[in-house]
Amino acid sequence: MLKKTICTLPLISVLALAPLSVFASDDVSPAQSSLLSDIDISGVVQTDYSRVSGKRSDFDFNDIEVRRGRMGASGVIAQEIKFKFVVDFDSPSNVHLMDAYIAFKPGFAPVEIKLGQFKTANSFDEQTSSNFSSTLERAAFTDVFELSRGVGASVAHKGARHTLTLGFFGGDITDNVFSRYAVAGRATYVPVLVDDLTVHTGVSFRYRNLDTDQPMYDYSQGVIAAPTGNIVSTGRLARSDLFLGEEVVALKGRYWAAHEIGATIVNCMACANDPVLTGGYVEVGAFFNGRRTYSGGRFGRPEIYTSVRNGGLGGFSLVARFDVLDLNNGSVNGGSYQSITLGADWWPTPYTRVGLDLFKVDTDFGDVVPELAPAFATAIAGGLTREDAHGLTVRFQILI
């Protein structure tokens, strides 16, 4: 009952505080007296073409999909309370709420309190919007360890060089909010901020626990391009785990480099010892006729020096990423892989993007077959122990 009460509070707050906030101040000026201000309507459509083939297996994926379609609104209520709502509609039959929260500064402390549905504070790659990510898909460990959203509350303190965030969460608003809980936190610091050089460092954690009537957590991943089906998987292992991550990012002029490592200590139900599953990446990139921007512990919308609408060619970026994933530890043999992605983006304007990712994934299969894509399961049954998959993704993105 206590967990249900705690998880329900953020939703009640989102619904109740908005109308009540009109009474927050009795001495606002006429120019400030409107209930809503700074309203911003936003949206994105990402359309992907992906082709992925296996060298040793019969795996073949060839498809066009709406990778993301989202509309949202944000603004300020009574000059004091920020709000944001985002709805995902990647298909007419699959419409669901992504973000729904309010945020405010209580006045008695230099912090911001956030209530509602939003992401846990983990990973630089995960905190950066998919609209502005370096490659078209995030690092594998962010998917395998399910760094995602939940209904909850967080407290954050932000300065010119640092961020500190701590939150408590239930399940996703589109699922069973009361089926799980998580505690997550992140700390970032910018030790170097001179001229055109910025160095970001950060650490984060998340502990999560699942109710006993829910299917246990599994740790699985496909061949980069979603949704290709799994190529590695541990099967269902645990009802709780602890994620730990570290991150280092540097930007200098048109160039950037990023590195992250994530490890999850799994409270395995059937293992002699709790396994530690790991993943991480390193990337380097360069921007031409533009630059990456950084704020608040993540990449932001790129700055384009001369866009097409202003008679220029737009911005261009190149990136190379090496991504690793290891789901083998102790008695757990879920498989492992290493991938290389070469990406190129053209930004005609800061609101439009045409991207191309070429990738190659070298995989050592694990011993858990039922969770894999059929072609990989068949290959293992035929005696194969590894696979070299390669492919490409082309993305057309429009932001409003």
Image (tube, rainbow, N blue to C red):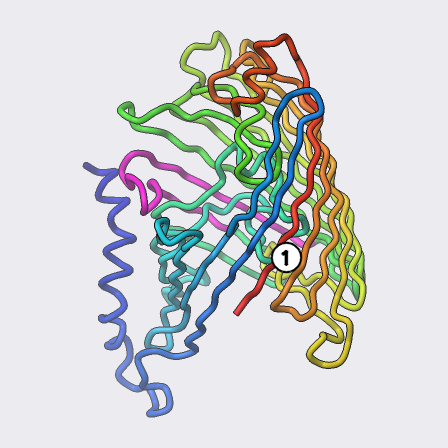
Q: Is residue 186 magenta?
A: yes
Q: Is residue 341 left or right of residue 228?
A: right
Label 1 element class: strand
Q: Is residue 395 magenta?
A: no
Name the image quarter holding residue 246. Answer: top right
175 or 70, which is in the foreground? 70
Instruction: Identify the residue under disc 1.
Output: 299
Name the image quarter holding residue 340. Answer: top right
Q: Is residue 68 left or right of residue 356?
A: left
91 or 176, which is in the foreground? 91
- Relative image position of residue 272 (x, y in whole percent): 48, 7
Image vertical order of residue 279 relative to residue 196, above or below: above
Magenta span of residues: 165-190
Give the residue drawn at x 51%, y 62%. Answer: 44
- Relative image position of residue 285 (x, y in whole percent): 78, 51
Q: Amino acid at mark 1?
A: Phe
Give the residue drawn at x 34%, y 47%. Answer: 151
Give the residue drawn at x 62%, y 66%. Answer: 352
- Relative image position of residue 174 (x, y in whole percent): 32, 46
Name the image quarter holding residue 348. Answer: bottom right
139 or 267, which is in the foreground? 139
133 or 28, which is in the foreground? 133
Image vertical order of residue 126 relative to residue 70, above or below: above
Q: Residue placed farthest to the bottom in the image?
A: 30
Give the residue drawn at x 19%, y 36%. Answer: 1
Q: Is residue 1 left or right of residue 287?
A: left
- Relative image position of residue 98 (x, y in whole percent): 40, 53
